[in-house]
């Protein structure tokens, strides 16, 4: 009989928390946009026809998109600070933490710096359905650090 070892299963995607300035904002049903892409510059070397040199140039990130059922006005109020700002954008720090299935251990964590809301989408209302009213907030940021 073969010896049993530690399993290394893929991480589940539903045990996560999001905070802004170390303050928990309530449960989110969805978080997307944790994505970075490095652009490349192609260089075609004369006499070398079997490949093209690729050089990394700049890395860009996508906006974070957060979705949750409307529970309070906190996200709306934060976005309104940006909309009504007199030249000063209220920058904050956001964190995303992913836990294991038992929510006992942190599996991954990211810290996002100089964060501000750049898009707010209100709920889609439909009187023929009994779905939850969901708001979406997109966050722009300048820098990210993976903490775990």
Image (cartoon, rainbow, N blue to C red):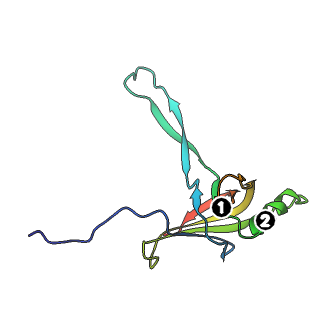
Name the spot of residue 21 as percent of width and height, x first.
69, 73
Quadrant of residue 50 in the image? Answer: top left
Q: Which residue is denoted by mark 2 in the rendering?
A: 78
Which residue appears at 18% of the width and 72% of the height? 4
Name the spot of residue 111 as percent of width and height, x first.
60, 67
Quadrant of residue 137 in the image? Answer: bottom right
Which residue appears at 48% of the width and 36% of the height? 54
Q: CA distance from mark 2 to mark 1?
A: 22 Å
What secondary structure is marked by label 2?
helix
> Dot 1: few (<14), some (14–19), or many (≥20) neighbours within 10 Å?
few
Q: Which residue is denoted by mark 1 in the rendering?
A: 132
Q: Do labels 2 and 1 touch, CB within 8 Å?
A: no
Name, please, the residue furthest toward the bottom: 104
Q: Is residue 134 above or below residue 100?
A: above
Which residue appears at 46% of the width and 25% of the height? 45
Judge from the rendering whether residue 47 lies leftward or rightward of residue 140; answer left or right: left
Of the pair 125 and 4, the residue shown nearer to us: 125
């Amino acid at each position: 009989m073969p010896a049993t070892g530690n399993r290394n299963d893929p991480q589940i995607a539903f045990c996560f928390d999001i905070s802004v300035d170390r303050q928990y904002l309530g449960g989110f049903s969805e978080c997307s946009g944790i994505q970075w892409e490095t652009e490349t510059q192609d260089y075609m070397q004369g006499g070398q026809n079997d490949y093209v040199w690729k050089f990394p140039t700049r890395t860009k990130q996508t906006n974070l998109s957060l979705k949750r059922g409307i529970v309070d006005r906190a996200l709306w109020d934060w976005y309104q600070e940006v909309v009504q700002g007199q030249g000063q954008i209220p920058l904050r720090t956001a964190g995303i933490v992913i836990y294991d299935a038992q929510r006992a251990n942190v599996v991954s964590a990211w810290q996002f710096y100089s964060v501000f809301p750049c898009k707010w989408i209100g709920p889609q209302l439909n009187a023929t359905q009994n779905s939850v009213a969901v708001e979406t907030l997109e966050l722009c940021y300048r820098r990210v650090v993976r903490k775990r």
